Image (cartoon, coloured by chain):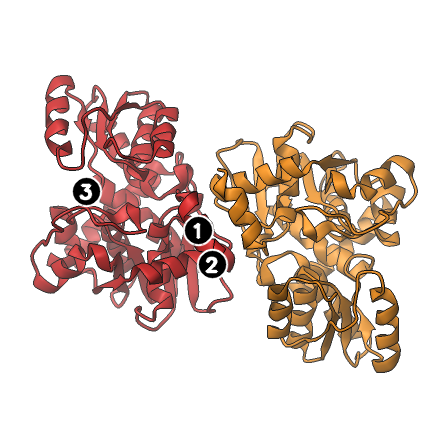
Chain colours: A red, B orange
Amino acid sequence: MSDFVAEHFAAVRTAADRIKPHIRRTPVLTTELDPHLRLKPECFQVTGSFKPRGAFNAVLSLMDRERPRGVIAVSSGNHAQAVALAARTVGIPALILIPEDANPAKVAATRALGAEVIQEGITFANREARLREVMAENKYTLVHPFDDWDVIHGQGSAAMELLTDAPDLEVLAAPVGGGGLLSGTAIAGRAHSASMKVIGVEPEQADDAYRTWKSGTIQSLAESPKTLADGVRTTAIGARNFEVMFANRLVDAIVTVSEEQIGEAVRIAWTRLRLALEPTGCLPLAAYLAGKLPPGRTGLLLSGGNANFGTVAKLLEHS
Amino acid sequence: MSDFVAEHFAAVRTAADRIKPHIRRTPVLTTELDPHLRLKPECFQVTGSFKPRGAFNAVLSLMDRERPRGVIAVSSGNHAQAVALAARTVGIPALILIPEDANPAKVAATRALGAEVIQEGITFANREARLREVMAENKYTLVHPFDDWDVIHGQGSAAMELLTDAPDLEVLAAPVGGGGLLSGTAIAGRAHSASMKVIGVEPEQADDAYRTWKSGTIQSLAESPKTLADGVRTTAIGARNFEVMFANRLVDAIVTVSEEQIGEAVRIAWTRLRLALEPTGCLPLAAYLAGKLPPGRTGLLLSGGNANFGTVAKLLEHS
């Protein structure tokens, strides 16, 4: 094991201990699809996605290092709820910037967790600028959704649990948006076994990580992509994620799946695996079903279950 | 513990050991709905329901006692797939009688497990008579879906596992159709704790078990009821089930839920618990949500996940 992997895996273990009282140890499921497959259904995690693993680690670490006045996050989805829950748990305020066109159900879920939500005048394009303004005003500390070591180490606890329960896995596959989950998965996977194959899965329509892997430098999407997998619409991975995944070569490959393949994976998840996953959570299953993963005993990190049910109902009508 | 409970719980333990290589140990889930709730999601069981627990115990016991030429079952649903799988596993033929108007997807699933299916001329009304004719012809052995001690003891393994994982539960709730799962649950529950409250849940439109509990004699429905919970359309519980549940008073109460309450439970299961359950599997959740279960730490046996997706898609459109 390289020093890089050893050092970061030690941090994953510390994160797992730190967040243990606040998160669920999700089960590992087997399936009739294939006896070599193991599923880690993070849809059963608190708030319905893996995101509290990283958010709790970041917020609890902040509480140890400094006493932040409050935390701030930019997210229209699962990271927003995770930061809101972590902040409420430690008793500090959370302020979440959510673009005006976000799903009202997710905004309501974030508010229900006690966060203050700012939506007025926030767009996908201006949100970074607005973030800096708001931070200058209130001196809250940013919890980045993926380009943050504490977040990366917290997300790694999911693969660590999976490999504790299923130590003979040879392949791990996880969705990749900004790269938080995939970076943590790669650290835990390579620490477990030097020969572990770690694969990131993204939609064809959001192939910046694929192009980053191929080119060796961070590539961006020109605009937020339209894809069923709305959890990975980030336009580029982060610098720390690049360092883990590609500079240190802990990720073996990025594979892409089509919208049709994502839709089919959602149908299989809901009808045959009996898992009510969001499309983003089905990305590794889509890659598996499309034959895009290497052979061997394979663990799929199914990242979350906060689906838009209108979309899923339409997909199910055709099954 | 009474001799009756002790004797039957010993048989549940024997069953659990016997079927162990063939079934899955499903996980126990916690939920944000209520910290006192524990879920046993049998939708993750092989074939998508708890039924293989009893079917494997019955078929493996038959193989020990006699060498049956084959097994036969009457079912349009989960029991059919369970018997087909158990027979294929031990290498004997399975013949399943399925009424002509059954869901083609379930017929196909049963055939895919290697069973011979007879549908021609089978109706809900004539199926018992047709069964006797076919049995007289081929000398196959019947595997009854609920009125059979081996089946009851096999089904009890689900509650036994749940109580091993969550030993402090005070209330257990399970669906009741013919009473196989509820009888096994009651045996395992009362063996675990004399003060365990065991509750059966059925649709208002199929309230024969409720009327049987109230009157103290087996009551029947005039015809197969129309309910979203199509797994509990049996018109009466069995004699052995009556013996366990009411003659020996191992079940504390039967509660009924409306079609609206079942539909709401399906929506909550799919959208908040992220479990793709069939409506029958949601009955205990419906009783919980409607406030019809006693207070205390509660385990819900969520019996299966073989849903009609057209029906669920319609329910989800309104969520």
Alpha carbon distance from label 1 to label 3? 39 Å
Mark 2 chain: A
From the top left corner, tell me how far across and down residue B305 is, in percent: 58, 53
The tag on residue B266 is none
Mark 1 chain: A
Q: In this view, does B187 lie to the left or right of A47?
A: right
From the top left corner, tell me how far across and down residue A234 is, in percent: 20, 46
Amino acid type shown at disc 1:
Lys
Residue pointed to by mark 2? A318
Q: How many labels does the image show?
A: 3
Residue pointed to by mark 1? A314
From the top left corner, tell me how far across and down residue B82 is, in percent: 67, 65
Residue pointed to by mark 3? A149
Corner quadrant of residue B168: top right
Which secondary structure, mark 1?
helix
Corner quadrant of residue A56: top left
Residues packed near mark 1 inside 10 Å, few (<14), some (14 to 19) or many (20 plus): some
Mark 3 chain: A
Identify the residue at horizontal 21%, vertical 61% (top origin). A251
Q: Is residue B64 left or right of residue A41?
A: right
Q: In this view, does A226 lie to the left or right of B26?
A: left
